[in-house]
Amino acid sequence: MSQPSAAYMADYKAKNKAKLAAQQAARDAKKRKSRQSDPEARAAYKLKRRQEYLKTHPEAKTRESITEATKLAKQARTRVKIDSVDNGVHMRTCDKCGITREMESFPRQGTYGRKKVCKDCSGVSVSHKKKPEKELPSFKVVKEHRPAVFIHHGQDWKAKFLAEGWRCLGPGIGDDVESITVFMRGFIIMYTRGQKGSYATGKTSYAVLFDDKQPRIVTLAKAETRASKLYGEAM
């Protein structure tokens, strides 16, 4: 039986590309299933793929080389840290005095390491005693009684406002706690908080007559500016 030509095979693969891909996928799935059930076949497959990878990546490190490098580095650290073992006790020779001592006689360096010079030569105390913690000063919170601050001192504060041209509209207007007194001069209203009670501060706030949109104003100058904008020449 004669073999088909290359042109025929190329045309056949092009026409049956999806069919051939499905057949190949079925064969691959069958191989994977057989490898999963056979440990030896799975190990052989991994070894084959690994060898193929190392051929294409010659600079790649193998697991054996990484393990060997880690082992050598660990041995090197062990040789540096421990010179000998005496009845299960790790010993080291001091680089300064030359005396072989127990590992506990060398000061710590880092988390797991030890220095090469013993504590006697380095001037470090053999017994590491924990330094006593400094006692922090205790602060006692004392609530001091602060009396009410009055802006207008003395008993003649109402007389002072009257002398400045204010007209008292009513003393003690409001509740018994705040006891707000209202004064008026021109288009400006002044509210003075009372001189007694828990809310007594003697502070003042201002407002403009018939100006309901604006909240109380803190300073008299701002109140006068506001009133001049509303009433203009009438002031």
Image (cartoon, rainbow, N blue to C red):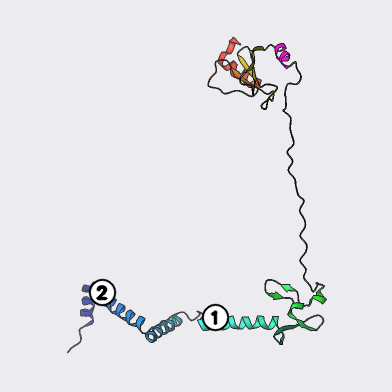
- Name the quarter where the C terminus is drawn: top right
- Quadrant of the frame with the N terminus: bottom left
Position of 39 relative to 202 (above/below): below
Q: Where does label 2 land, which residue?
A: 22
Q: Compare marks 2 and 1 and give the one earlier in the sequence.
A: 2
Q: Residue at x 73, y 73 (%)?
A: 108
Q: Is residue 77 above or below residue 199?
A: below
Please indicate whether residue 97 sits to the left or right of residue 230 in the image: right
Secondary structure, mark 2, is: helix
Question: Which residue is the extreme one toward the left?
Answer: 1
Q: Is residue 159 magenta?
A: yes
Q: Which mark is residue 66?
A: 1
The amino acid at mark 1 is Ile
Q: Which residues are magenta?
A: 157-165
Observer-nearest of 102 and 77:
102
Q: CA distance from mark 2 to mark 1?
A: 40 Å
Residue 71 position in % (x across, y down): 59, 83
Q: Name which residue lies at 70% across and 12% down.
A: 162
Q: Secondary structure at mark 1?
A: helix
Q: Main secondary structure of the magenta part?
A: helix
Q: Name the residue at the front extreme.
A: 176
Residue 10 circle label: none
Seen in the picture, residue 127 relative to 185 is either above or below; the reply is below
Q: Amino acid at mark 2?
A: Ala
Disc 2 crowd rating (10 Å Cα; few below 14, some 14-19, many 20+) is few
